Structures are given as structure tokens and as C-alpha cells.
Image (cartoon, rainbow, N blue to C red):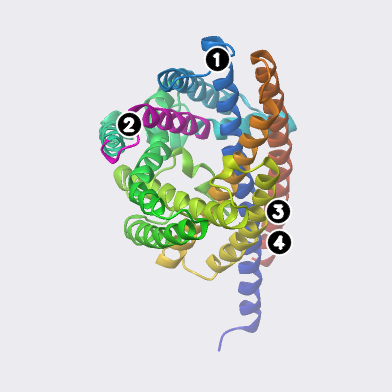
Amino acid sequence: MADPMQTIKKVLMDDLHSKLGHSAHIQVFLQKVLAVLLGEVLSSTAYEIITVIMVGDGSMSNAQALIARSIYAVLISIYAPVAECMIKKRVKNPQSFWGCTALSHANICAVLLAWAWKNWAAALDTFAGAELWDEAVIALAMTILVVAAQSAPCFGKNKAAVAAGGDEDTVMARFMVIPASLGLTLGYLWNLVATYFVSKVQALESSYHFDFMIQAVYALIACTSCTVIVCQLKKPRPIENGRSQSVNDWSGLTEAPEGHLKALTCTVLSFVYGWALLDTCDDWGFGVMFNCSSYSACSYQSNFAYSLAITICFTGTSFLLCRLKDFEPSDSKLSQAVSLQINAMVLTVGWAWMNFYSTIMSDATSGEPAGTKVLEYFSSMLCIVVLHSLSQFIAMRTHAGWVRKINEALETLE
């Protein structure tokens, strides 16, 4: 018969590990949502500045928009690796406000890079045309380029160096692993290909309810397919101090037990899954509930209500799913499927607030002179940067406190 005290001890230790995991989940959830929002804010602000320089108060053609997005993507590709590497090496006190702020910025540099190239891909797709052939060729060409870059021996060597940190994590190594941040770009492009016929079927009827039902059927098929494939390819990653490496999953810089190409496939499919969920929620919220053709056709007040509802619903649901993972082995298919769903919900929440930001800024800057537009975008960017810094500082200190208290409790139990 098992010792009752040992049984009680095991239950208490499992509960403490669970609480630590939930604390980490809060921090990861908040960081990813704010990273999506901040990526859009910085991209929009830079785009407005470049627009003013190029055309002043005029409107951009598709070719000019592509040039503007290309300029920002190149600039952020230079800035992000340098900033991330230098900040992580120079911060001495990560527990201080300024240390936490600097590290938070360093952690999202790869996300900013990913978002810049995703917006570039969107501009390229618009410039090329909206036919299936155009979208398929761009998606295939970009996939070949990224796979070729990630297959190079120097990529694997430098990615391992960046993941390990230390002296080998240099600025040059960061530049060499830029292709790791293009998973979002590929996910976006292949999502356009996957949803081409969905939009064609939806165009057969001018009914928001019909659009939602078609999108819901597609989402069911796409999400199921993505889940099956990812569960077959993906291997579990280690958990340290109750916090998995999912904080930086979007950067593509974490070590992948399943290999570079399989990891890239899983990343792309996770974004396709995320967009399927987002589009379904959008068709329900904006189409069925608000009678709008898209988020941009609705008011920013409607976007705010939608974002708030999505945040409340998906935050609660993600915590329930996180609780479910506590009772599943980390290498089980169900645990991996739950992780994929949580990631999609985080993306949807982040994209919802990003769309709210786009609509309110569009309304605020409508009819304003070019200089005023730039000033308003820059002011909003500063506000969101401050919000991001404060939120990350509070979440980091709270998580650090939980880690300290729970480790003390675990040492007492042992």
C-alpha cells in the first residue's frame, strides 16, 4: 500500500507545478497579444511616414505600396537582429523596470520582423493580382526560397547558436537566421491559396449567414487537417520553471526536436489554422451580428465590442484548455492539439485588437493633412509601447514571484 503522506505530497507538488504553469500561461498570452498589436502599430506608423515622404497627401498605387512595405521590411531586418542581440547582452538587471522593458522589446524583435515581411507579402500579392495562379506562384516561390535558406548548413549552425545564447549568439548569427521569422509570411500566403475557392463560393450568395456557414465548414476541414498533420510532425518541447518555450514560438528561433523543415511546416499550418479561426469569428461577429462585409466596413465602436468579447471568451477558454493539459502527457496528441488551439485563440485575440486599432486610426486620421496623420500615428505608437512595457513588467514580476514562492514550497515538500 502506498504511503498516504507520499500521496499527499505528490498531489501538492503537482498542484504547485500547475499553478506555476498557469502563471506562465498568463505571461505568454499577454506577450503574444501585445506583440501582434505592437507589430501592427510599428508597421502602420512606419508605413505612414514612408507614404508622406513618397506621395505627401496623395494616395499610394499598388506598386508604391509594395515599395513602401519593402523599405520597412529591409529597415526592420537590419534593426531587429542588432537590437535583440545587443539588448540581451547588455541588460544587467532584468528585474528592474527598464531592464524588463528592454528585454520585452528584445523578445518581440523577431515578431516585428515576421510582421513586416507578412505585410510585404500582402502588398506583393495585391500588386501581382487576385487570381489563384498569382497567389499560388507567389506562395510556392516564397516557400522554395525559405526552405532553401533554412536547409543551408550555416542556418542550422547559427540557429543553434542563437537558441543556446552565450558568446556564439552574435549579431551576424542573428542576421543568418532571419529566414526563421518567415513562417508567418508563408502562413499568410498559403492561407490566401487555401481560401481562394471559399471566397468564390461565398460570392454566389449575398448573405452574411451563408458566408458564415461556408467559412465555418472550411474552418472545420482546415483546422482538423492542420491538427492531424501537426500532431504527426511535432515533438514536445521541454518545460523549464513552468514556462514552455512558446513565448518565442512565433520567431522560429527555438530549437525544434522535429527538425527545421518539419518545424517550418508546423509553423505555417499553425498560422493557417489561426486564420481559419479568425475568419470564422469575423464572419460571425461582423457579418451575422453587425451586418458588415468586413471589420474595416464596421465602425471602430463595433470593432471594440467585438475585440472585447473575443478577449473575454478566448481568454477563459484558453485557461480551461491549459487546465486540461495539466492532466495530459506533454507528448500526447491531445496535448499538442490543445496547444495548437490555444495558439490560434491567442492569434485571434491579437488580430482582433489590431483590427480595432486599424479602424480607429483610420477614422481619426480621415481627412487630416499628411503631417497630422504621422503625428497621430506616432503618438498612438508611444502610448501602446508604454502600455506594452508596463504590462510586461507587471506580468514578469508576478511570474517571478510565483516561481520563487513555489520553488520554496517545493523545496519544503522535498
On the rendered image, what quadrant is the N terminus found in?
A: bottom right
Q: CA distance from mark 4 to mark 2?
A: 42 Å
Residue 58's label in the rendered image is 1
The crowding category of the residue bearing disc 4, from other C-alpha atoms within 10 Å (few below 14, some 14 to 19, many at least 20), is some
Q: Is residue 225 above or below residue 137?
A: below
Nearer the viewer's eye, disc 2 or disc 1? Answer: 1
| Residue stretch in magenta | 111-133
**Disc 1: CA contacts within 10 A as few (<14), some (14-19) or many (>=20):** few
Q: Which marked residue is nearer to the observer: mark 4 or mark 2?
A: 2
Residue type beneath disc 2 = Phe
Question: Where's residue 213, x and y in %?
Answer: 46, 62
Percent position of residue 76, x then y = 50, 22
SS under mark 3:
helix
Q: Which residue is mark 2?
A: 155
**Badge 3 density bin: few <14, some 14–19, many ≥20, Cα 10 Å:** some
What residue is disc 4 on?
A: 409
Residue to which mark 3 is pinned:
402
Label 3 to label 1: alpha-carbon separation: 53 Å
- Sequence-first tag of 2 and 1: 1
Label 2 – label 3 distance at C-alpha: 37 Å
Q: Secondary structure at mark 4?
A: helix
104 vs 228, left or right, is right
Which is the main secondary structure of the residues drawn in magenta? helix
- Mark 1: secondary structure: loop
Q: Is residue 288 above or below residue 375?
A: below
At x 60% / y 37%, what residue is drawn?
A: 37
Give the mark nearest the N terminus, 4 or 2: 2
Decide which of 349, 155 is in the foreground and name it. 349
Amino acid type at image mark 1: Gly
